[in-house]
Image (spheres, rainbow, N blue to C red):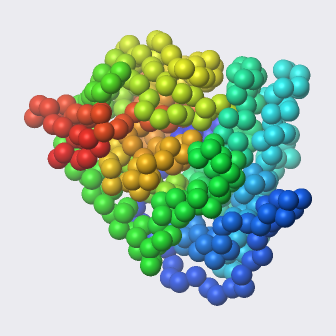
Amino acid sequence: MIAALPWPSSTGSARLKALPSLGPGPAPERLPFLPMRHNEREGATLTIPPADLSGYADVVFDVAVPLLPDDRVLINAEIEHAPLARALAEAAYARGARYADIWYFDPYAKRSRVRHADTATLAEVPSWLDARNDELERHGGIIVNIRGAAAPDLLAGLDPVRVGLDRMPSLTSRQRLQLGNLVRWTIVPYATPEWARAVFGEPDQARLWRHLRRILRLDEPDPRAAWRQRIAELLDRARRLTEMRLDAVRFEGPGTDLTIGLLPDAHWTAARLEDVKGRPFQANLPTEEVFTTPDHRRVDGMVRSTRPLSLDGTVIRDLELTFAAGVVTDVRASAGADVVRAHQATDAGAARLGELALVDRSSRVGESGVTYLETLLDENATCHLAWGAGLPPGVPARLRTDDPVRLDAAGVNTSRVHVDFMVGGPDVTVTGLGPGGKVVLLRNDTWDF
């Protein structure tokens, strides 16, 4: 699950999940917003219909982060995301938001910083950027993070150590709000021309949006009802996995033979959360996974990633990891291995696993047959693992605590990073190992139990 870092550390406190209802009734009527021209110099107009963006914003504020009157809303976006950010602001105010604040980040400026800035300054974050998040903490509200890179491979070829020092646009203050579920928050995708170019070889934003529209269930007569049904299906599958009382899960396929030990009384769930006041939200839109938090000490074997991974502005290809006693002992890739090594050197837990997620072929992301070079989508196409922090909702209730020392002693990863990478596919068989022996969980990307 792509998310903020979930465990207490220097950056914040724990994150929790729950299943609630999916929000209020029909959206209020409002005037249509005016879309931004994508390229004024060339005169190219927006290729995503304004009605689609309005409908998308309705789903965000009725399903993902149900908005209440007088809520404050922070929208974090790249410059290319402006049409969706504006649609979200329109929808927020139409629902009675007190203020909708849009923060635009420019990844090209980040590239300039990584290339030229003094190394000693690369980790610095101006305090005024944290002030807006601190204000939201005082009043409560909503954070919407828009994904969809202006250029997925923008930082390729730069010094991976320097790239790793500059964590922007990630902010400790925002992580703290999301880690502790002090606000309702979500991550949603938006199609950009350069993202489309990376995926399809041409900047066909409309083509990419057609895929996203179906993945987001915006093509359904009632997207909210469609999401309610899908979440119920995922939670039922998670319940059945929990009842199996599995001790370990084994992945076998080309280049892969990996056994992952689970925590005692392993708990499986799906991606629904509650904030500290018990209000529901969905942190990832879309979501197609069921997941658990494994025992970071009990991982052995080799695993080959089945899809590219976009990490720190570099696309990692053909990633292979070797584990022994829970720790990554070897990293190989046809592109980007040094970036992975640098990331896994962040702290003691960064070279250990923190998530095991299962996804079957009924996923709309997987059905599309497209590799999106965006983890929010690709992790919902097939089974995936994550190095770094474990996820609190996937930890048995008796082991949950705010004490990182006790968590680590129980086998729960408390790293400051969390990176998902895809390992499933039709050639990968997933087997559960438990009291009743072996049971095939997934074969040919299809549930087998």
**Res 16 seen here:** yes
Residue 341 point in image, percent of width and height: 58, 18
Taking the spot 89% from the left edge, 22% from the top edge, the residue there is 118
Of residue 273 and residue 206, the one placed in the foreground of this image is 206
Residue most toward the left? Answer: 436
Taking the spot 59% from the left edge, 35% from the top edge, the residue there is 310
Looking at the image, is 174 positioned above or below residue 30? above
Of residue 114 and residue 353, the one placed in the foreground of this image is 114
Residue 254 point in image, percent of width and height: 33, 24
Of residue 192 and residue 176, the one placed in the foreground of this image is 192
- Number of labelled discs? 0
The quadrant holding residue 247 is: top left
Taking the spot 23% from the left edge, 47% from the top edge, the residue there is 447
Q: From the viewer's perspective, is 34 left or right of 52?
A: right
Of residue 367 and residue 377, the one placed in the foreground of this image is 367
**Res 190 seen here:** no
Looking at the image, is 220 positioned above or below residue 143? below
Residue 166 point in image, percent of width and height: 76, 30
Residue 411 point in image, percent of width and height: 39, 26
Taking the spot 53% from the left edge, 20% from the top edge, the residue there is 333
The quadrant holding residue 355 is: top left
